[in-house]
Structures are given as C-alpha cells and as structure tokens.
Amino acid sequence: MIPSLQTKRLILRPFTEDDLDNVFKGLSNPDIIKYYGISFETRESAKEQMKWFADHERNETGAWWAICLKDSGHFIGAGGLNDIEHDHKKAEFGFWLLPEYWGNGFMGEAIPAILNHGFEKINLHRIEGFVESKNTNCQKALDKLNFTFEGTMRNAEIKNGRYIDIDIYSKLSTD
C-alpha cells in the first residue's frame, strides 16, 4: 500500500479512480506530453494509465502519487517511481505538473518526498531519471535536486518517427 506523503504545501496521495479526469487532463496536454513518454487522446484511453498505476502498486514495481495542494486538495500533477528492481535496489523516477502550476517550486517540494520514500521505505540505493535531451526544464529540475548527469544515449528512442537522445541522471542513497 502506497502511503500518503506531506510537504509544507502539498499532499502526495495514492491515485484513486476519481483521478481519471486529472490524469487525462495532464497526459493529453501538449505542453506536458511534448517530452513525456505517454499521451492519451481520450478520457477512455487514459484508463490505461490508471490501470498501470494500480498494477505497479500491486506488483511492487512502482509507486506513484497524485500531487495535490494541501490547503484545497486540488490536483496539480503526479510523480513517482517505476521499474523498481528490488534485487538491484534501483528504480526510475518520473513526474509531471499541470502547466498552470509551473514555476512555483512545487516539484522542488514533491520530488524530495518521493526520493526519500524510495531510499528510506523501499530501500533503494539508486534512482534514475531518463530525460529527453531537449527537455531543459526537467534537466534544470534534476540539477537543482543534485542528481548526477551520467551521459547521453544517442538515438535511444523513436518519437514521432524521429530518433531522440536520452540523458541519464541518477541519485544514490549515499549522495
């Protein structure tokens, strides 16, 4: 069971079926999906993401939270860990925030709570971030959180019929 986490201004809580509209709103928004690996064109198709959250929680291969404002409970984004490999004590980190909340420091508040949960409760040693090389906003966020840039995988994926480069970042429990 994924616990709720709190920061000064935020509550990070497990997803519920009631979050479908919020997930669709985020993962159909052109500003978010520009550099995100998933997108949905219909509310119905976004149910795949809700199922993915539930399956990964049940299989202990992921832990994702709905990020909400503490004072109102209003949904503003999502963040979490996926591809958790318990044997190797590592996971991949991901996040997105609705554009109207960009520039307010919310991710700088939410991400450390997620990382701490990964290191302290899941007993991870390494958390990785894979970022499209052109996604400078995400790179800046990871730099501020003291992730280490490890290098670039050239032509690592195909997106919209073109090869894209992926930058690798990591943070260790000993950092």
Image (spheres, grey):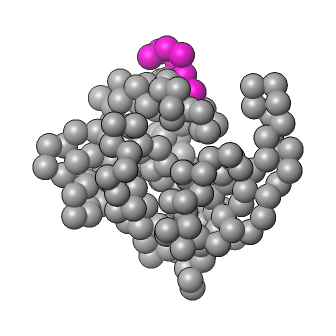
Residue at 19 percent of width and 43 percent of height? 73
Looking at the image, the residue that sits furthest to the bottom is 174
Residue 95 visible to an observer of this rendering: yes
- Spot occupied by residue 128 in the image (x, y as percentages of width and height): 64, 63
Magenta residue span: 39-45
Residue 126 visible to an observer of this rendering: no
Residue at 44 percent of width and 16 percent of height? 43
- Spot occupied by residue 145 in the image (x, y as percentages of width and height): 49, 69
Looking at the image, the residue that sits furthest to the left is 71
Q: Nearer the viewer, residue 148 or 116?
A: 148
- Spot occupied by residue 34 in the image (x, y as percentages of width and height): 59, 33
- Spot occupied by residue 23 in the image (x, y as percentages of width and height): 41, 31
Of helix, strand and loop, which mostly describes the magenta segment? loop
Up the image or down, 117 lies above or below 38; here it is below
Residue at 51 percent of width and 35 percent of height? 32
Task: Please identify the quarter of the rendering in which residue 124 is found.
Answer: bottom right
Left or right: 9 in relation to 87? left
Quadrant including the N terminus: bottom left
Q: Does residue 43 belong to the magenta stretch?
A: yes
Up the image or down, 1 lies above or below 25; here it is below
Left or right: 158 in relation to 22? right
Q: How many marks?
A: 0
Up the image or down, 108 lies above or below 18; here it is below
Left or right: 7 in relation to 127? left
Quadrant including the C terminus: bottom right
Q: Nearer the viewer, residue 82 or 98?
A: 98
Q: Does residue 110 belong to the magenta stretch?
A: no
Residue at 54 percent of width and 16 percent of height? 41
